[in-house]
Image (cartoon, grey):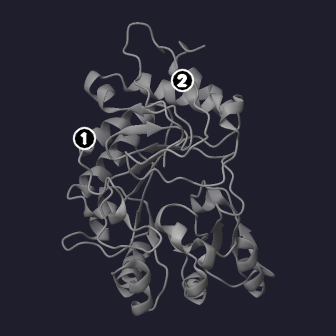
């Protein structure tokens, strides 16, 4: 079964009825802000000692992914716009995946001097996810460790004017709940999808979780009047692949959705191929079927790497070790974080194509954040 041609593997994946995979690139660990629930500068690998992928590497990965019918790439960080070559990275992904591809990015919206949304859009960016947790400059600064929500709002307005789809990510904390609701209300007049995100009991947020966590169920109850006559917006229409319901309150231009990985997490429809800054590809965020891509880039064997990825994703539908669910969405932003205990480790895949190098699977420890 493992020597099957790649288009047959792609067809086999399509036959299971799950969303087709997309590329989810973490471009860096650097950020010039310091959100209280993230605090990247506390991480042991902050700044990356290892050499990250280059713009040409991203273009090559996207080109191979396109032959597997992948039509979406998303970039996050850290803050991806801090990369000096970010415009080239976006351009390489757009060229590699080809016409009609969705190329997106998550940013705090306070772009560095010399970089503009217009440049990103011309390079091929089609949608922008903006992190915004309060519209009040002082309270926003407390939450995010800097930045200015007024600048973020200008970024949103510019993106909309350029025809980009815009989603706003707002992490809810009990102390700042009304701030979150004010952010959500931007969707009353703007054609955006505001995503209210539950705090997760991981990393720096563990110190906040007991006092600051508020569940989707409680938030829905508080926003009952908004949702009484709301209509549902399809995820396909929004370009969203994560589980969850998106609602457009009556008379609103935009919609509100929830990302609730603490109270009602599921990965039954997960379809991200996570790729770290140094080029480690992971078809699942908790289980070890990882492939360092740099060797394949050097040897011209990316087709073997993608065959391994698609085979691994197919097996998660039938192998009990994948479990089919998880309670925490470990973000895998970086390369050297300690894996959580207790996740079963699957065996390595054998060589996919005779005569080619076997994909190098990652360390045999349990799940990685």
Q: Residues within 10 Å of mark 1 (few under 14, many from 20)?
A: some
Q: Nearer the viewer, residue 311 or 202?
A: 202
| Residue of label 1 | 56
Q: Nearer the viewer, residue 107 or 42?
A: 42
Looking at the rendered structure, the secondary structure element under dot 2 is helix
Q: Residue at x 73, y 83 (%)?
A: 250
Q: Residues within 10 Å of mark 2 (few under 14, many from 20)?
A: few
Mark earlier in primary sequence (1, 2) = 2
Q: Position of residue 361 (x, y in %)?
A: 44, 27
Q: Position of residue 141 (x, y in %)?
A: 38, 85
Query: Closer to the observer: label 1 or label 2?
Result: 1
Q: Nearer the viewer, residue 187 or 276?
A: 276
Q: Residue at x 56, y 58 (%)?
A: 239
The quadrant of the image that shows the N terminus is top right
Residue 101, placed above or below residue 131: above
Residue 357, placed above or below residue 159: above
| Residue of label 2 | 7
Looking at the rendered structure, the secondary structure element under dot 1 is helix
Instruction: Report, in whole angstroms, how far the alpha carbon at label 1 lies from the one at label 2.
Output: 25 Å
Q: Nearer the viewer, residue 359 or 67?
A: 359
Quadrant position of residue 147: bottom left
Q: Position of residue 302 (x, y in %)?
A: 37, 27
């Amino acid at each position: 079964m493992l020597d099957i041609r790649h288009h047959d593997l792609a067809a086999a994946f399509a036959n299971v009825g799950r969303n087709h995979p997309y590329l989810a690139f973490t471009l860096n660990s650097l950020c010039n802000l310091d959100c209280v629930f993230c605090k990247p500068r506390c991480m042991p690998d902050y700044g990356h000692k290892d050499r990250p992928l280059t713009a040409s590497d991203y273009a090559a990965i996207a080109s191979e992914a396109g032959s597997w019918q992948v039509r979406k790439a998303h970039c996050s960080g850290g803050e991806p716009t801090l990369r000096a070559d970010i415009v080239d990275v976006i351009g390489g992904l757009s060229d590699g995946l080809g016409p009609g591809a969705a190329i997106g990015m998550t940013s705090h919206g306070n772009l560095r001097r010399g970089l503009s949304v217009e440049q990103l859009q011309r390079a091929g960016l089609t949608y922008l996810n903006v992190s915004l947790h309060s519209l009040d400059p002082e309270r926003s600064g407390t939450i995010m460790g800097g930045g200015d929500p007024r600048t973020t709002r200008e970024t949103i307005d510019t993106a909309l004017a350029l025809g980009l789809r815009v989603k706003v990510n707002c992490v809810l904390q009990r102390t700042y709940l009304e701030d979150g609701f004010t952010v959500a209300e931007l969707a009353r007049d703007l054609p955006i999808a505001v995503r209210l995100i539950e705090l997760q009991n991981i990393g720096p947020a563990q110190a906040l979780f007991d006092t600051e966590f508020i569940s989707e169920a409680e938030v829905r109850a508080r926003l009952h009047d908004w949702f009484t006559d709301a209509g549902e917006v399809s995820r396909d229409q929004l370009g969203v692949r994560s589980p969850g319901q998106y609602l457009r309150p009556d008379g609103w231009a935009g919609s509100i959705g929830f990302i609730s990985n603490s109270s009602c997490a599921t990965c039954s429809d997960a379809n991200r191929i996570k790729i770290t800054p140094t080029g480690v590809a992971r078809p699942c965020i908790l289980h070890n079927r990882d492939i360092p891509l740099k060797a394949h880039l050097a040897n011209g064997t990316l087709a073997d790497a993608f065959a391994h990825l698609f085979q691994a994703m197919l097996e998660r539908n039938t192998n009990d070790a994948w479990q089919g669910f998880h309670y925490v969405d470990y973000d895998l932003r970086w390369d050297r974080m300690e894996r959580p205990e207790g996740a079963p480790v699957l065996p390595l895949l054998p060589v996919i194509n005779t005569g080619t190098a076997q994909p190098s699977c990652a360390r045999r420890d349990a799940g990685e954040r």
